Amino acid sequence: MRMNTVLRKLLSLASTIVRDFELAAAGLIVSVAPTWRRSRCSGCGQKQTRYDRLPARTWKHLAFGRLPILLSYAPWRVDCPSCGSSHAVRRRRTVR
């Protein structure tokens, strides 16, 4: 079994791809990405085209023993004609 598969199953991540991981002083940093192709506006929730990425953000996941786990993701931005503004992509709930 590949390490990415082990991490995805260990963290119970749904609709998520594990891109990379590294062991740092802060803990295990897991870079993730959604499996869906069309992005949704965080304002109205409609599917829109994406145009660039925001800087990577990190979220704390439940610790594995004494090892803190951080999820890292650089969200897309969408230009939404329905809302009339630019928004970050709506995050899907990733924990089952």
Image (cartoon, helix red, strand yellow):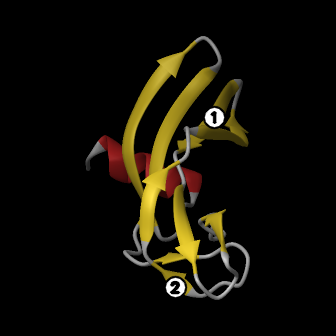
Q: Is 79 on the left or on the right of 52, as rendered? A: right
Instruction: Give me the disc on residue 47.
Output: 2
Instruction: Report which residue position mark 1 lands on.
Output: 69
Residue 39, image x, y percentages: 49, 74
Residue 8 locus on image (x, y percent): 46, 54
Return the residue nearer the eye: 78 or 94: 78
Q: Secondary structure at mark 1?
A: strand
Judging depth in this view, the residue of 70 and 58 nearest the camera is 58
Identify residue type, mark 1.
Ile
Q: Is 40 situated above or below 62?
A: below
Q: Is 81 located above or below residue 19 in the figure?
A: below
Per the image, label 2 sits on a secondary structure element best described as strand
Q: Nearer the viewer, mark 2 or mark 1?
A: 2
Residue 65 falls left or right of residue 50: right
Residue 22 rendering spot, x and y as whole percentages:
44, 25
Which is more toward the observer, 9 or 61? 61
Residue at (52, 46) in percent of width and height: 74
> What residue is drawn where x is 59% and y is 42%?
71
Can you name the residue that lies furthest to the left here?
Answer: 1
Q: What's the residue at 59%, 88% (across, down)?
A: 46
Residue at the top extreme, as displayed = 25
* 72 versus 47 height, above or below: above
Q: Nearer the viewer, residue 92 or 8?
A: 92
The amino acid marked with disc number 2 is: Lys
Question: Are dots 2 and 1 in contact, CB under 8 Å?
Answer: no
